Amino acid sequence: MKPRGILLAGNWKMNHGPTAAQEFFRALPYSKKPGATMRIYPSFLSLSTALDSVNSAGKEIEIGAQNFHAEKSGAFTGEVSGPMLQEIGIHQVLLGHSERRQYFGETPAVILKKTVSALQQGFEVLLCIGETLAERNAGQTQAVLTHQLESTLADPICAAAFGTSLHLAYEPVWAIGTGMTATPAQAQETHASLRSLLTRTLGQTSADAVQILYGGSVTPSNFAELLACADIDGGLVGGASLKPESFGALWNLIPS
Ligand code: 13P
């Protein structure tokens, strides 16, 4: 078993309304596994249905939101706040996804503000980071990841939360939805260097407790190899999380 446990998380992005969500959880083969957690991030609109579905089926699957607004309430048309999510029973949030950075202009400063607010409100945060192909080809992977993390590492609230309520997902942008997975060796090398960065800034105990998930074209055919790497603590899955068969197959690959 992995020292930090394994997290298999599905990010549904803008897919699966309430009807499809209900059908997904009905059909999902699920059995409890010691040391492993399954989590799904549905769209805001499907959160309540997802919670009802897993609760009524007695499946211990965590449900989280894909985003939230840093303010607790106010004139922010179209946004959803932490207290609203908590009112329906959501205590997990995904932040900093590359699609939020790319399509919605979320800068490191915006993501930091959301992360701090989420932690202060008692959420558990999975923070996504990752480099583009151009950045990787230019040998800038480490510099980009360090830049994406440095304000978070420097913030006392975030620094204290790493390894308890703040964990990471490394998603190379070039591997998202492209079928181009990082090789296990590439992913492990990056995860190990992220853990060294965490160790240098937070100390060994906290760094060792941070789950670092890999994301980017994870499928049942590559997940076992990725999971066998020492610093890969699970997967953040897009496309393969949409079908109960493929997500169930990923879950079954986690050793009991
Ligand atoms: P894919 O698994 O579809 O590549 O998506 C990865 C992702 O962005 C999960 O957040």
Image (cartoon, rainbow, N blue to C red):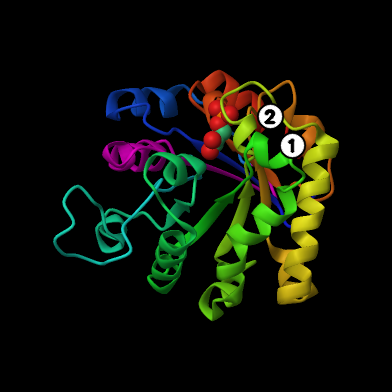
- Packing grade of label 1 (10 A; few <14, some 14-19, many >=20) is few
Residue 91: percent from left, percent from top: 41, 58
Type of amino acid under label 1: Asn
Q: Is 44 a magenta residue? A: yes
Q: Is residue 196 above or below residue 100?
A: below
Q: How many marks?
A: 2
Which residue occupies the foreground of this view, 53 or 104?
104
The residue drawn where x is 81% and y is 35% is 184
Q: Which residue is mark 1?
A: 137
Residue 218: percent from left, percent from top: 65, 29
Q: Tag on residue 252?
A: 2
Tell me if I can see residue 30 in this picture.
no
Quarter of the image containing the C terminus? top right
What is the span of residues highlighted in magenta in the rendered image?
33-58
Residue 224: percent from left, percent from top: 78, 31
Residue 208: percent from left, percent from top: 76, 65
